[in-house]
Amino acid sequence: MGHWNETCCISNLPILSGDDVVVFILEANHSQSIPYEPRPCYVGANYTPLYTAIRGEYDEYGSIENIKGQNQLIAYLNNLEISTGTHKCKDVSTKIFTPDTITDDIGDFTPAKYFLPNYKKERGYLACLFVHASLYDLLVSKVGERTPYEREQPISTFYAADIESKLQEAYTEYQDAIQSKPSQYAELIFSRAFESAFKGICSNHVHTLALSYCEGHYPGFAKEFLDLMLFTKALTLLRKGWLSFSGIGGQGEELQLHKNLAEYVLNQIAERKRNWEENYGDEGVEMELADTLHWFD
């Protein structure tokens, strides 16, 4: 198969070969017994991230390469027993993650092809989402610098302190349990405390990274998880969702963040127009415009 451009889930701009991207592996919340929500109110109604974001470069074949120093995260992903096929959960599992690249299969994450076996005794279907890294960082920054009403600190400072506090509470429960219980039982206690504290932000698989962070083995987790929380807040304000829109029933009218998004899109368009002019001159720009207008004939 030939190469192709991915799509940025926020701007809907094409992602080109070599572009810096952020990728989320998503786990479906719907299944045979839990229906898909076609008009969601909440960001995570249908999908939530399996883990925190993966940073790399788009390889023009639906995958990423040159992952940005996240070998610990990739190691956790590589330990997942992900199954393929359309039959029972006992289908042959496959390792689709490596420290240097995520295989081309990631771009083909479609329902009924990849799933976590025996997830709630049903298939936990997986999907994939791409965002331009610069846009991801912009939205995280713009949301994080806001100061909520009647608070003295910006959201990023408040979230960071909240993460540390809740993780330490969960880890204290874990340490108490491990004194008299098997390690698997103690980890289950940590997992449930983590899920209770951060419900709706991500899949509970993230608790493995959180526990590793609390034990001093994954120092980058706190920042990655903070960015995930801020990005989720940005999705809410933009009335978007993981692979869909959101906000049905909401009465908020966010304008500033939409303005930031529009400015980003306009800047990207201007930059790509300049690239066309530099490479092909005025004739190239006319060809591009003619090709665009063709769709409106």
Image (spheres, rainbow, N blue to C red):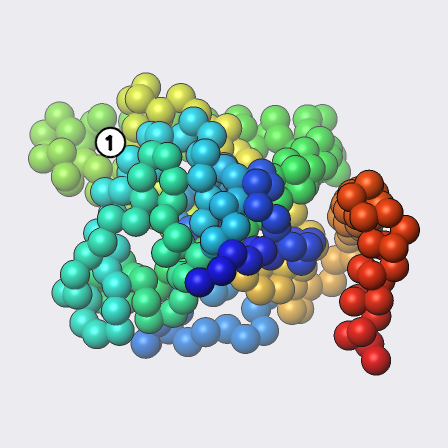
Residue 191: x %, y % from top left: 29, 42
Is 157 placed above or below 128 here?
Answer: above
Q: For the N terminus, which image quadrant?
A: bottom left
Image-based side of 244 in relation to 148, left or right: left
Residue at (78% x, 44% y) in the render:
279
Q: Where, quadrant-wise, is the C terminus in this rendering?
A: bottom right
**Residue at figure coordinates x 24%, y 48% from the top left:** 95
* Residue closest to the far top: 216
The amino acid sitting under disc 1 is: Tyr
Residue marked by disc 1: 174
- Badge 1: how crowded within 10 Å, few (<14), some, or many (20+)? many
Q: Is residue 230 visible?
A: no
Q: For this view, does 287 lie left or right of residue 242?
A: right
Residue furthest right as drawn: 282
Residue 296 percent coordinates (x, y): 82, 76
Q: Looking at the image, which is closer to me, 288 or 32?
A: 288
Q: Helix or strand or loop: what does disc 1 sit on?
A: helix
Quarter where residue 87 is shown: bottom left
Quadrant location of residue 138?
Answer: top right
Which residue is depicted at the point 32% across and 67% down? 113
